[in-house]
């Protein structure tokens, strides 16, 4: 039916319906476009498309279990993605483990934990199908590998002293005097520090960092060979050392090879175990016979131990018979009586000694009371001696005290004449006596 044949009312309703359908399609299209844009925005946000990314590289011996797009882990979190895996060109005659070049990105602020010392890459197994993951360890010393602060390297140390607000500027290099470290990076600029730097660098430009100027992108990267920060150009990428573990498949193959090599020894061990078990069976049979023979001994031991619990048949009664026990009792009674008598005698002796002590004490008192007795006795002795001496001098008693002369021998031979005596002049009697 042509549109011209419709009534005006129907034509008006149809125009309203067409406008409603048009608005519905327009609104649905706008919502679809908005939802698609929001999805893209969230995906980009989750993948860090709007964040600064720090590129790193490392080498690995084998690229097995690693693929482009795999996550990079830092402290247990998803910190970035692997962006490039390239095998290195072979070099004839050179043996190296750097066979595969791997490049990866770390999203901010995660790359702030990657420092020049302590940070390295580990390739750990993450499944039973040979999959591996890339883990980065947190830095422990040194300084950040990438920065977003503004870097200046167009000033000498003398010119840097004229900068305003030196406290907002940091040193961006290691100042070395030969091999001696004079100043380390990230020290606040001071006139003294710049003076020391000028003494070492002279007219060379100094690398300094403006901490007040922070960019959304990476501005500088640390150059470990030159010991300073340099401007980042996406070609001077920082490299990390690796700690690579052997792939799970390789370890399984090595384990299978070791098991195959150990199988003959294992079979030999099983044979030896069979022999040991058969010997153990015979040993248990022999132990059964021995236990049967030992039952009477155990019964006798039970009877003996039962007798030991009886006071009449205890071990003491066995060791010391009844007659010996009676004699020991009699001996102990006699010893007790002897000790009692000895105690009585000692008491009597003690009393006697007390009496003697009293007598000597009385005698001492008497001597002290009659102190002139000794003087009189001494005078008597002296006068007696004087009396005897007087009697010796008195003429009537003098002969009583005369000394008796010594008796002379009846005949004394004359002494032998000397060797030079004239024998002819001597008489015959003297000659014979001398001879």
Image (tube, rainbow, N blue to C red):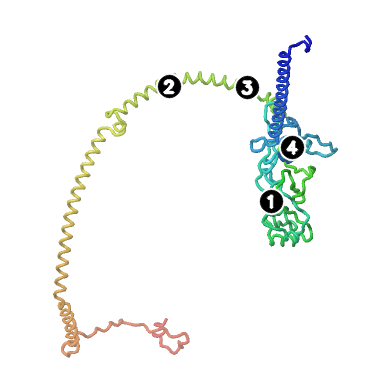
Which is in the foreground here, disc 2 or disc 1? 1
Tell me, yes or no, if residue 147 can be seen here: no
Residue 190 on image: x %, y %? 68, 59
Residue at the location (16% across, 63% down)? 356
Residue at the location (67% across, 56% down)? 167
Residue 308 on image: x %, y %? 32, 28
264 horizontally vs 348: left or right:
right
Q: Earlier in the sequence, mark 3 or mark 2?
A: 3
The 10 Å Cα crowd at callout 2, few under 14, some 14 to 19, many 20 or more, is: few
Q: 28 above or below 245?
A: above
Which residue corresponds to mark 3?
270
- Disc assigned to residue 294: 2
- Disc assigned to residue 104: 4
Q: Nearer the viewer, residue 226 or 398?
A: 226
204 horizontally vs 276: left or right:
right
Residue 383 on image: x %, y %? 17, 84
């Amino acid at each position: 039916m042509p549109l011209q044949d419709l009534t005006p009312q129907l034509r008006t309703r149809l125009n309203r319906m067409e406008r409603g359908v048009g608005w519905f399609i327009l609104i649905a299209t706008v919502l679809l476009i908005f939802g698609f844009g929001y999805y893209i925005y969230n995906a980009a946000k989750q993948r860090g498309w709007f964040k600064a990314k720090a590129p790193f590289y490392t080498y690995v011996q084998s690229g097995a279990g690693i693929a482009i797009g795999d996550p990079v882990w830092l402290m247990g979190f998803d910190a970035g993605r692997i962006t490039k895996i390239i095998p290195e060109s072979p070099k004839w005659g050179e043996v190296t483990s750097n066979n595969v070049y791997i490049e990866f990105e770390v999203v901010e602020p995660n790359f702030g934990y990657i420092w020049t010392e302590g940070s390295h890459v580990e390739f750990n197994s993450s499944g039973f199908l040979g999959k591996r993951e890339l883990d980065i360890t947190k830095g422990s010393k040194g300084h950040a590998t990438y920065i977003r602060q503004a870097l200046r390297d167009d000033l000498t140390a003398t010119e840097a002293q004229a900068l305003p607000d030196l406290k907002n500027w940091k040193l961006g290099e290691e100042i070395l005097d030969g091999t001696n470290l004079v100043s380390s990076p990230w020290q606040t600029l001071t006139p003294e520090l710049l003076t020391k730097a000028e003494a070492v660098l002279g007219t060379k430009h100094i690398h300094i960092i403006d901490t007040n100027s922070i960019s959304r992108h990476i501005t500088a990267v640390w150059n470990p060979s030159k010991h300073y920060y340099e401007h980042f150009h996406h070609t001077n990428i920082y490299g990390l050392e690796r700690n690579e573990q052997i792939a799970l498949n390789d370890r399984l193959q090595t384990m299978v090879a070791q098991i195959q090599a150990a199988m003959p020894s294992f079979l030999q061990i099983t044979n030896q175990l069979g022999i040991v078990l058969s010997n153990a069976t015979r040993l248990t049979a022999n132990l059964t016979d021995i236990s049967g023979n030992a039952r009477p001994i155990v019964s006798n031991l039970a009877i003996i131990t039962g007798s030991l619990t009886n006071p009449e048949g205890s071990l003491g009664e066995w060791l010391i018979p009844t007659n010996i026990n009676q004699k020991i009792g009699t001996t102990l009674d006699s010893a007790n009586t002897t000790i009692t008598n000895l105690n009585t005698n000692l008491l009597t002796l003690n009393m006697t000694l007390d009496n003697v002590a009293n007598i000597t004490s009385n005698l001492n008192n008497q001597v002290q009371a009659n102190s002139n007795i000794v003087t009189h006795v001494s005078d008597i002795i002296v006068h007696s001696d004087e009396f005897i001496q007087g009697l010796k001098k008195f003429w009537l008693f003098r002969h009583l005290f005369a000394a008796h002369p010594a008796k002379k021998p009846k005949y004394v031979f004359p002494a032998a004449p000397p060797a030079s005596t004239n024998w002819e002049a001597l008489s015959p009697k003297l000659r014979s006596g001398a001879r």
